[in-house]
Image (cartoon, grey):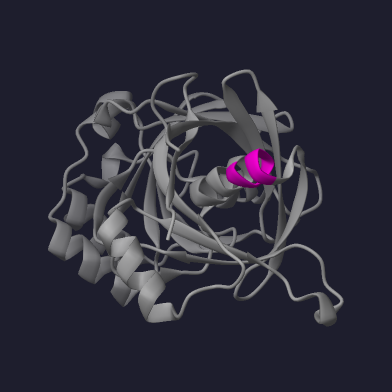
Amino acid sequence: MDVLRIAAFSDGDDGGNPAGVVLGEALPAADQMQRIAAEVGFSETAFAAPLVAQAKEQGWRVRYFSPENEVPFCGHATIALGAALAAQEGDGIFPLTLNKTAITVEGRREGGLYAAALQSPATQSKPADAETLAAALALFGYPHDALDPALPAAFIHGGADHLLLALRSRDALQGMAYALDAGRDFMLGRGLVTVILAYAETPRLFHTRNPFASGGVYEDPATGAATAAFAGYLRDLGWPHGGAIDIVQGEDMGMRSRLHAKIPAQRGSSIRVSGTARWMTR
């Protein structure tokens, strides 16, 4: 089975978050997809197959697997999938049917790179409870005054569930550290896919880090699902985003990644998250 390796949300020809992409006539069995994802070893691998014609649906059936489990939605693997579909099918917008929702991804060739944009599932957010916040601060070793009071801790959703912790300083973000096993217990015990740590350089430019212990990965260098959820949270909060934000992620890992999110006015609506993708191998 051919596994494409594509770095999504790249910073030009560098950086980005590696994802596996498997295109086939039909999806393999779940245990086979899980085994392949573990062998690939990237934070996620996307598996896609054309929807059956007699179902009167067009597009692709997609499932996402981390090395340890299936996840409901993965943004960077969707961007990588958009690049792979554009390479195979030509530039276009591709409808995707996920386990619990339907989205689209757009892919087009731009010189030696591919540009891709996903429309996320619906977004929602709510304040984090005191117990979860205290446990998160203990996990990362942050005092309460390390948090940015302008961006209160929250549960955020954009196809998957995340916890947002916003920090007052870039130095605090750079100093992120935690124990992987404790992080896995924290995230799985609360149904979280990742924790997003964010620092606002300006109202429209953020630096983020995304521990992904729930999938057995210490940190993700670019996380489209969390970016969509975060953009929806900013809209819910009434943050002065001006209709779009840019995110730099992965810099502290040496894998600088760039993500852009457009934020429509309607509360709860889909977020468009875009970036470039570079082929690692063909």
Residue at the far right: name it. 56
Q: Position of residue 105 (x, y in %)?
A: 69, 48
- Helix, strand or loop for the magenta stretch, by majority: helix
Q: Residue at x 66, y 51 (%)?
A: 236
Q: Is residue 110 above or below residue 104?
A: above
> Which image quadrant for residue 132?
bottom left
**Residue at image point 48% right, 75% down:** 28
At a point 60% along the width and 40% down the height, the residue shown is: 83
The image quadrant that residue 259 belongs to is top right
Give the vertical position of 78 relative to 278 (above or below).
below
Q: In the displayed structure, does residue 154 sit left or right of residue 18?
A: right
Q: Which residues, given as a range, are shown in magenta? A: 84-88
Residue 198 visible, this angle: no
Image coordinates of residue 251 in percent, x first then y, are 33, 26
Residue 169 in the magenta stretch? The answer is: no
Residue 63 showing in the rendered view: yes
